[in-house]
Image (spheres, grey):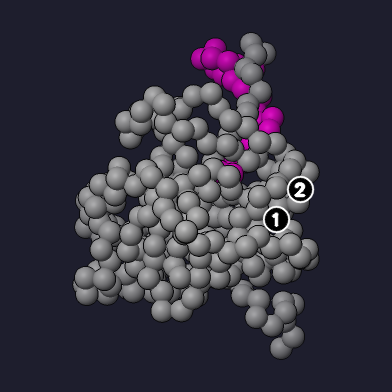
Amino acid sequence: MVQAQAPGVPVYAEGRGSRANAGITAQAQKLVDSGALPLTKALVEARMKERSAPCALTLPNENSSHLDGRAVWQAARAAHVRVGWHYLCTKCDRWHLSLAGGYAITADGVVVTCAHVVRREDMKEGHLIAVTEADEVLPVTEILAASDALDTAILRVKSSTPLTALPFAKGTQPGDHVWCFSDPEGKRGYFSDGIVSRFVKRPFLRKREAGAVNLPADAPLPVWVETTTDWAPGSSGSAIVDDFGNAVGHVSEIQTMLQPPSPARADKKGAERSAGTTIVFHQGISAQTVLSLIKPMP
């Protein structure tokens, strides 16, 4: 049978939930039973408080050869690692999976994701895991550096084979072409492109960042890279990649701007309603922010 896709291009099965993730759940539970998943909820919470200092790493050199879209997809997909929890929820007695994005930055098992991916409250117990594109569960063995204010966590994972690492971009500018490989709303392997629209730095930490984790008032502030690339919940932590196969940062959040309500648009109770969305800002943590948590090896 003739297929539309080239050899080696995956065809993802649609679906999410326990049935779609049954194989990953079974692997994770086997690792739990063998004691191979050391980072429990309590230990992760303790490590997140202890790991604010930069970690020492040897990073790959920035790529300088221009890639076409197919090559960027291959690089982004190869470095993509899902990160999240195998956990027992508070509402039932079943084990669940909650996975978002991440990306390898060294071949020997260092992965970056969002701090908010690593933190999860709604569980009785759980174990932090990483999952490859081939659906192999990798134990997360250590948190090397983390900052809630910078929405970044740098993790060590245990893999029997070298990971494909992304270098960091050092000279990104607005107008640069960028790409994102992620799993928005659990839809695997979504690849989209856009441009860098601007860099922005807020003058304050919001309640979600500061209040929930009791950050000090003088906590460092992130530099956000805004892009026109598509992503959604589930994409957090996935790399934003340039035309050279370098990470310019990672997905952090979405801000939706609504048109202000007007008296002409009121519901039956008289409350004014917005006319709808005017623009959606896609905000990532910049490479320079991630690099502030890394010091070069001597």
Quadrant the N terminus occupies? bottom right
Which secondary structure, mark 1? strand
Which secondary structure, mark 2? loop
Q: Give residue 176's mark.
A: 2
Question: Which residue type carries mark 1?
Answer: Asp
The disc, 2 or 1, on the residue closer to the chain's N-terminal end is 2
**Vertical relation: 26 (above or below) 218:** below
Image spot of residue 147 (x, y percent): 41, 42
Question: Which residue type carries mark 2?
Answer: Asp
Residue positioned 65% across, 60% down in the render: 62
Structural distance between the alpha carbons of marks 2 and 1: 7 Å
**Vertical relation: 256 (above or below) 47:** above
Q: Is residue 114 magenta?
A: no
Q: In this picture, which residue range is highlighted in magenta? A: 265-286
Which image quarter: residue 13? bottom right
**Vertical relation: 289 (above or below) 87:** above
Which image quarter: residue 60? bottom right
**Main secondary-structure element of the magenta-colored stretch:** strand
How dense is the environment of label 2, judged by Cα within 10 Å: few (below 14), some, or many (20 and up)?
some
Residue 24 left/right relative to 72: left
Q: Give residue 242's mark.
A: 1
Of 230 and 83, nearer the camera is 83
How dense is the environment of label 1, judged by Cα within 10 Å: few (below 14), some, or many (20 and up)?
many
Image spot of residue 246 (x, y percent): 65, 58
Is label 2 in contact with label 1 (beta carbons under 8 Å)? yes
Number of dots carrying numbers: 2
Image spot of residue 36 (x, y percent): 26, 71
Q: Is residue 274 magenta?
A: yes
Residue 186 at least partly seen: no
Of 45 and 185, nearer the camera is 45
